[in-house]
Image (cartoon, helix red, strand yellow):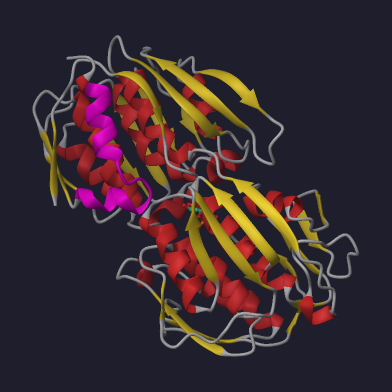
Amino acid sequence: MNTFVFPPHTIRGRLTVPGDKSISHRALMLGAIAEGETRIRGLAPGEDVRSTLSCLRQLGVSIQEQKGETVVQGCGVAGLQKPAGLLDAGNSGSTMRLLSGILATQPFTTTISGDASLCRRPMRRIIEPLTQMGATITAQANGCAPLTICGGKLRGIHYTLPVASAQVKSCLLFAGLGAEGETVVEEPLPTRDHTERLLRKMGYDLQMANGKIRLMPDSSTSSALVHSIRGRLRPSIASVFVPGDFSSAAFFLAAALLLPESELIIESVGLNPTRTAFLDFAKEMGAAIEIANIKNESYEPVADLVVRHQPLHGVNISGKRIPQLIDEIPILAILATQAEGETRIRDAKELRVKESDRIAALAYNLRAMGATVEELPDGLVITGPTRLHGAEIDSYGDHRIAMAFAIAGLLADSPTTIRGAECADISFPGFFEILRDVSRLAR
Ligand code: S3P
C-alpha cells in the first residue's frame, strides 16, 4: 500500500497513542509463566504484540479479551505445552528474542521463525548465552532464524552482554527464571528496564546495582512468578496498566515541533527514564516540551506531553545514552533536517540490524527529499535547515521508517508517497488516521 502525505500548514489537537509495545510483550510473556491470572489494560494493538499473543496461545496459554482488558491465565514457569507447529514471530525481534528465553526452559523442542526481515537479524547474541545455560539451539549458518530450541533444565549464568540490548537482557532474565542457581546479567550501558520493573511488580525479588541485574531463584518473596520447579505455588492476580508508547508519541512530538503554530497534547505517555533520552536531546536542540499530570505511583511513570512549534539547532548525539533513544533516531534525523547547523549521530551501529538497516534507509530517503546527509558506519551527519521536497519514499517494510518519513512529508513543498506504508501497523495501527485528524483541524 502506498500512502500520500500532503503538507498541512500546522497541526493541533489532543491525542493518545497506543500502549507501549515493549511493556506489552513482557506483560503477556510474564503473565503466561506466572501462577494465576494477569489482567492487562491498554495492551499495544500492533502486529508485533499480536505475534507474541498468537505464539503464547500456540504454547497452550489462555488469553482472552474481556471488557477492554486482556486476561492471561498463567501456566507457571515450566507449564507451557509443546506447540503443534512452528511459532511465527512475524516481524517482531522482541517476540523471538524474549520468547526464546522462556522456550529454552521448557522440556520440549520448538522452532520459531519470522518474516524475511526478522530472519536476517542477528540471533547469536541470544544463542550463545542460552547454550552456555544448557539449551541446544540450531539456527541458519549465519546465526539467524529459524531457531530450533531444545529446552530443558538450565543452569543460571553470570553474563556480560557484548552489546547493550534490552531484548538480550530480558531473554536471559526469562531463562534465568526457570534455571537452577543464580543468574546475573551485566549490561555495558543502561537499556530499557521494563522487564525488571514488571518482575518486581509481579512480586519477584531481584537486585539491581552497578549495571548488574541479579535474579534470586531461592527468593522467598517470589509470589506471582512462582518457581513451580521448586514447588512454590502461590497463585495471585496481577493487574498491569500499559502506558502510551513513548516511541509512538515521538513522531507527533516531532511533527508539532517542526510545523509553525502547532500545538499538541499527547496524553498518558510512558516516561520511563530508560526510554526518554529523545526528550533530553530535543531540549538540547531548543525544544521546550512540557510534562504535565505526572503519575508516578504506577510501576512505570506516566504523564501528558505538551508540545509547540519551536526553532531547533543541531546537536551531537552519541555515547552511553544511545540505547535510550535507539528507536527514536529515525524521527530525530527528520528533526535534524530542520535544525540550524550540523547534527551528528554516532555510536548507533545497532541501527543497521533493526527491522531494516535504518542508517542506510534514512540516508537514502533523506537524500531523495533533498536533505544534506552523510552516512557513517555508525550513524549520520545531517546539516540543516533544508527545504524538503516531496519524494517517493521506500519504507523498507520498517514501521519506524514509514512513520518518520510521513512526518518529513508534512514539511515538504509537494506531496510525498510512502511505499509499503501499511507496515506502520506493526507498532502503531491508526497512525495515518490520527495524523490526518490532527492535520485537518488546522485547515
Ligand atoms: C526492545 C529493545 C530494543 C528496541 C526494540 C524493543 C525491547 O532492541 O530497539 O524496538 O522491547 O526490549 P534491542 O534490544 O535489540 O536494542
Q: Taking 8 as reference, is 208 above or below it?
A: below
In terms of image quadrants, where is residue 437? Answer: top left
Q: Quadrant of the C terminus?
A: top left
In-image side of 194 versus 349 (left or right): right
Residue for point 83% across, 71% down: 182
Residue for point 39% across, 16% down: 312
Q: Closer to the camera, 365 or 40?
A: 40
Q: Taking 233 as reference, is 288 above or below it?
A: above
Q: Taking 36 as reference, is 102 above or below it?
A: below
The stretch of residues the image draws in magenta is: 421-439
- Where residue 37 sits in the image (x, y, percent)? 66, 62
In terms of image quadrants, where is residue 160? Answer: bottom right
Q: Taking 380 as reference, is 189 above or below it?
A: below
- Where residue 53 sits in the image (x, y, percent)? 47, 65
Q: Is residue 435 magenta?
A: yes
Q: Main secondary structure of the magenta part?
A: helix
Residue for point 64% across, 34% down: 301
